[in-house]
Amino acid sequence: MAVPRCATMTNVTSTWTEPSNTATALLLLGRGTDPASERGVDCPGDLPAPSDPDLVARATAAKAALGDRVFVLGHHYQRDEVIQFADVTGDSFKLAQQAAARPDAEFIVFCGVHFMAESADILTKPEQQVILPDLAAGCSMADMAVLGQVETAWERFVDLGIAGDVVPVTYMNSSADIKGFVGRNQGVVCTSSNAKRALTWSFEQGSKVFFLPDQHLGRNTAVLEMGFDLEDCVLYDPHKPGGGLTDDELRDAKMILWRGHCSVHGRFTIDSVREVRERVPGVNVLVHPECRHDVVRAADQVGSTEYIIKALDAAPAGSAWAVGTELNLVRRMALAHPDKQIMFLDRTVCYCSTMNRIDLPHLVWTLEELVAGRVPNVITVDEQTAANARVALDQMLALP
Ligand code: 13P
Ligand code: SF4
């Protein structure tokens, strides 16, 4: 990774400027359907109006009425209006751990996206129910790896006689089906904070890694943290016959990367980095490893969501930071640290639109339904898939 560099600016006062909107409008407060999105479903039930002035009071009252029966988890990319009701905030790994650590809570309300709620269901007791306040809160990256496609790729490895050398590794940001596939094939789940440890373990088990679904996290970790060459990595495209790779390319590769990416982090470009360096002399560029390889190379620091938060918390007053991750988080960090100049790496808006679907009306509706004795939007992973996925998740938790 690039050596951390830290610029100090004097007389920094108010620093946060909202990025300008793009032409792509967000669905207002999660209302309506978006057939082009990964799930394209809307939320059943009668949501309160977003303009209802009593939403905060209603959420407070419903949560108080439920008491210890409910535990609300909030991912760092959630809206402020939702985060204020979270019992704990964190990245996807920490939230999965937290869900598992609350065996007494009857209901886990997961303010995040679908794959996170699935992982929580896998790691919690059977009698606990995990609820996603809006079923349309999916993840476009997770949807880029579908089980049938992954099995087709694996059959190719079997036919080629290399499957025995390949260890499958999947990013937490994948469906339970994919985690189950990885568990069935002696692989491991990883997150952005333990990807290097997961790859180190995997290369002790075999000579190749099949990395799903985020090509960028896989490439950035292999090349920048493990010392592999870019030529050691090949890209398997599920939409091309044979993944678009020759037999020799597959035989020679050390990292077989799935062609998936995050539509939010994939927006940051090398031009964004150049532009901010010209505009803010001495700025520190801090990005998530889901960003493209050239962007990560051009950055000063790279790290998971939790790493980004710690780095900004620890930064000296007056320092300047351009951050390449989701906008809700960057804005919250900027407002929490008015003595530091924290800005968004891109000039245009970059929310995760599916994370943003969980809004206060959905949270109020969910909590009030629970108070009324109805349990909405339960996320359930079937027993066999859950058992296989648990193998890969437990392997991650056991990483040295
Ligand atoms: P983490 O929560 O592991 O930082 O992942 C980032 C992300 O994109 C979540 O969807
Ligand atoms: Fe998925 Fe990216 Fe949104 Fe995370 S930020 S939920 S990886 S689309």
Image (tube, grey):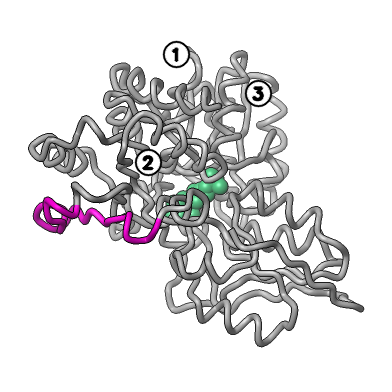
Relative to 145, is 333 on the left or the right?
right
Nearer to us in this view, 95 or 225: 225
As drawn, 156 above or below 319 = above
Does 40 sit above or below residue 85? below
Q: Quick check: is 244 in the magenta stretch?
A: yes
Please say whether residue 48 is visible from this viewpoint.
no
- Measured as percent of width and height from the top left, residue 301 is found at 64, 61
Mark 1 highlights which residue? 126
Which residue is denoted by mark 2 in the rendering? 174
Residue labelled 1 has its Cβ within 8 Å of some atom of ligand 1: no
Q: Residues within 10 Å of mark 2 (few under 14, many from 20)?
A: many
Name the amino acid, label 2: Ser
Which marked residue is nearer to the observer: mark 1 or mark 3? 1
Residue 317 x, y percent position in the rendering: 88, 65
Q: In this rendering, would 240 be left or right of 189?
A: left
Q: Amino acid at mark 3?
A: Leu
**Quarter holding the C terminus?**
top right
Q: Quadrant of residue 273?
A: bottom right
In primary-sequence order, the first of circles 1 and 3 is 3
Name the one closer to the observer, 97 or 171: 171
Q: Residues within 10 Å of mark 1 (few under 14, many from 20)?
A: few
Check the image and report above or below for 43 versus 297: above
- What secondary structure is marked by label 3? helix
Question: Which region is colored magenta?
Answer: 229-249
**Residue ID for mark 3:** 66
Residue at position x 66%, y 54% from top? 308
Indicate whether 362 appears above or below 313. above
